[in-house]
Image (cartoon, grey):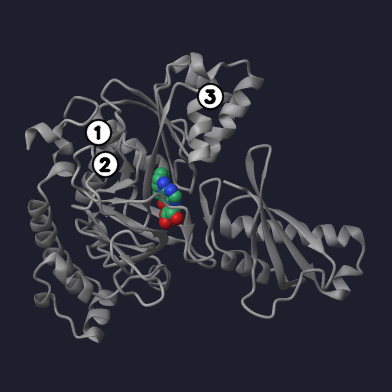
Amino acid sequence: MAQNWNDKNGDFHPASAMDFLPVEELRRIQSQRLVALVKHAYDNVPLHRKRMDELGVKPEDIKSIDDIVKLPFTQKTDLRDTYPYGMFAVPMGEIVRLHASSGTTGKPIVVGYTEEDMEVWNASVMRCLLMFGVRRGDFIQNSFGYGLFTGGLGLHGGAEKLGCTVIPASGGNTERQLMIMRDFGATVVSCTPSYFVHVIEESHKYGIDMKKLPLRIGVFGAEPWSEKMRRFVQDNTNMEAFDIYGLSEIAGPGVGGECPEHNGIHILEDNFYPEILDPETGKPLPDGEVGELVITTLAKRAMPILRYRTHDLTSIIAEKCPCGRTVRRIRRIERRSDDMFIIRGVNVFPSQIEAALMRVEESTPHYRILLERKKDLDTVTVEVEVSESTFSDGVSQLENVRKRIQASIMNIVGIRIEVRIVEPHKIARSEGKVKRVFDYRNI
Ligand code: DLL
């Protein structure tokens, strides 16, 4: 096997060994982990126990990874309904980290990690970075947001474990980002792809020639992006751009990443087991067919998750990857099966906007959400109707309502969204399934 361990980078880090295991060995590890996970989840999380009981499945019925199809699904709403800690399987004293992500309505969902979980997460991010060719000695400017979002601290932990020099720049303030990039000599940048496109655009304004910087690798994820964006980044810098995938409920960034073949995302399936299911029926789909990605956390202690419905649409690439990795690949994620959209790396559900509108008495449930790319920055505008009587109030009254709606949305979604008040009946009524989100971004 040893010869396969060297990918195009021509060197090998022992942590990458798990990417290249013989398939039978990988399945054996997955089976062993699944058996332990299911017992842990059944014994310690009432929701998992209840769901398994309802299906008549006992932990003893799960003997190998192939039995995974017998297990119940977990949904984002389960995390909402058990908010904040109801899905935790260990005493709070063992939790060393909390993060949060958007829920579908007013409250976020909370995820927790034990010390052991942090090890697994950091190692997973490190394996992705190794896949991209990042090495000890690289200076990584981490411009994912630090805070409750998993991007900042997630990338940080993996990069530090690898022995990189981490520059915890966090998001925003483009002029400062550019200055740091140049003065600190960053060789790797990690951030959302749309933000980096913006950084490149802005670099001209500050007289910085991106091609003269020592940057060589871009680590992009947390939102869908395209080959067009990759070309833009690669044409305007000396960087090679890589895709990193992940989600808070499963760990954060590092669930999978792209190898130098740039043909799909390798899921680190010794830790995160992928299935592709028909989103309607929940039945497994053959390799190559597009369906919903469902992931089981094979190595999680704090919050074991059985068959999480990600709502991300993709397919498994059946062919062996020329890089030699045996962990399977999925096609890059371009669409979701629900109405969640991602704006500047922040996940937003229309139902959150609706919950925010409901808190302002003068607003009505007639609204639409416009997504646009203005000067290479994503913007969201919510158009909302107000009642006849409110609309006939004076301009200053309307401005007051508008500001309160904006503040209410900020409170729930966490980002500033433009609000435009429109006259009653301006927004087309729908006869069937209502369309709320109009995406004009052309990613
Ligand atoms: O976005 C974790 C992350 C941080 C991944 C940094 C990569 C880099 P959440 O905020 O929970 O977690 O959002 C998860 O974002 O279900 C996808 O819909 C989307 N997403 C994440 N990575 C990608 C990607 C983080 N590479 C949701 N391509 C997921 C497309 C992505 N969509």
Left/right placement of residue 429 relative to residue 9 reads: right
What residue is drawn where x is 85% and y is 71%? 390
> How far from the left and from the top, in percent, is residue 286?
28, 65
What residue is drawn where x is 80% and y is 70%? 386
What residue is drawn where x is 19% and y is 49%? 116
Provide the residue designation for mark 3. Answer: 236
In the rendered image, the quadrant that contains the N terminus is top left
Q: Earlier in the sequence, mark 1 or mark 3?
A: 1
Provide the residue designation for mark 1. Answer: 161
Query: Pointer 1 and pointer 2: residues touching (CB < 8 Å)?
Result: yes
> How far from the left and from the top, in percent, is residue 71?
23, 74
Instruction: Please tell me which residue lies in front, 259 or 403.
Output: 259
> How far from the left and from the top, in percent, is residue 354?
63, 69
Q: How much space separates mark 2 and mark 3, taking CA atoms?
A: 31 Å
Q: Which mark is residue 122?
A: 2
Position of 205 relative to 120 (above/below): above
At label 1, counting other C-alpha atoms closer than 10 Å, the crowd grade (few under 14, some 14-19, many 20 or more) is some
Q: Secondary structure at mark 2?
A: helix
Q: How much space separates mark 1 and mark 2, taking CA atoms?
A: 7 Å
Q: Secondary structure at mark 1?
A: helix
Residue 163 found in image quarter: top left
